[in-house]
Amino acid sequence: MVINFAAGPAKLPEEVLKEVQKNLLDCNGSGISVMEMSHRSSSYGKIQETAINDLRELLNIPSNYRVLLMQGGGTGQFAAVALNLIGVTGTADYVITGSWSEKAAKEAAQYGKVNAVLPKEAKYISVPRQNSWKLDPKASYVYYCDNETVEGVEFDFVPEVPAGVPLVADMSSNFLSRPIDVAKFGVIFAGAQKNIGPAGTTVIIVREDLIGKHLKSTPSILNFQLMDKNSSLMNTPPTFVIYVMGLVFKWIKRNGGIAGMSKLANAKSQLIYETIDKSNGFYYCPVDSNVRSHMNVPFRIGSAAGNDALEKEFLAKAEADGMIQLKGHRSVGGIRASLYNAVTLEETQQLANLMVEFYKNNK
Ligand code: PMP
């Protein structure tokens, strides 16, 4: 048996994979696979519409918000957000708290003036409180990343923005893991390959009045207005991915909805952080305790700087026990356990058990 702690593409619910397998050759009685269906057919149309409606229900998305499905991943949205919004005043505020928001700011700087709200940090291990932020009341939008996947830094509050300035959030790695008040946001986006489904589509939730403000040079494929006008069917979407996404939304609905996912995420992450904190410094998580991610738990072994030999041994032992993809991101090293929605409490308990055993044998 293998337990997959990957940061993304990540584990999908087994129930969903079995459903995909069962329906692979004959989707919903059509006699063909979903992969072989025209994206203009009513059979496919129903699949996409149901998925979007289920998402609207899960997140209680207000009626003045549109849901778009686009390609290009999270990285595509780094460009799309700027192309669609920065032209309003020519500038945007970026709250940089980790690698992904840093990348997003760099991408946006190609299309307008980017104002860094925070001084540059040597290490991303905290979220400075909002009273220290320098927000520009004339910004086209304020951008932040709700959960920094590499560093394991997750916001413990929703930023307050100046009146009339929309808030844009990258929720790629914590989407559908905790309740959100969509009405506080101008745009929310999330790449699929963590809590949504296989890689290949990106969900964008955008407030209606923010559509149509794109720069003239915006490529059609990244244009919110064109995508919206064409119900995300302007060109051929990744139909199979969207089909699986729809099954994942149904699975979440069957498993307590967002409240159920949130409860589970709290329990799983607490288990690992407690194991770290009770190890007398043998395991070390650098992130401030109030912003430790419920989805991605990074830690070092042996010391704050990490002990390469011990970390290698831990990864080898984990792999021998069937626990895979625990290596930290190449930019920060160490270990990272990603605990997305499909990872069970029992699986997380096994990782905690391994950590306790490894600590006892090596302290
Ligand atoms: N934002 C976040 C928070 C991410 O974790 C990632 C990828 N892991 C991205 C953006 C980039 O996504 P993609 O690889 O789909 O472009």
Image (spheres, rainbow, N blue to C red):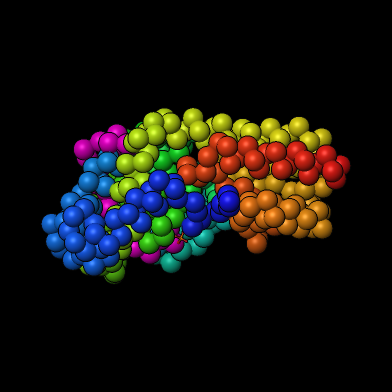
Q: Residue at x 65, y 62 (%)?
A: 330
Dividing the picture into quadrants, the one containing residue 102 is: bottom right
The percent position of residue 120, horizontal first and vertical second, equals 62, 52
Dividing the picture into quadrants, the one containing residue 252 is: top left
| Side (left or right) of 249 relative to 92 | left
Residue 353 in view (yes/no): yes
Say whether residue 71 is magenta: yes
- Looking at the rendering, the stretch of residues picked out in magenta corresponds to 57-75
Quick check: 162 above or below 67?
A: above
The percent position of residue 88, horizontal first and vertical second, equals 31, 54
| Side (left or right) of 206 relative to 7 | left
The percent position of residue 42, horizontal first and vertical second, equals 13, 57
Q: Residue at x 70, y 38 (%)?
A: 353
Q: Nearer the viewer, residue 219 or 250?
A: 250
Q: Quadrant of the C terminus?
A: top right
| Side (left or right) of 34 relative to 312 | left
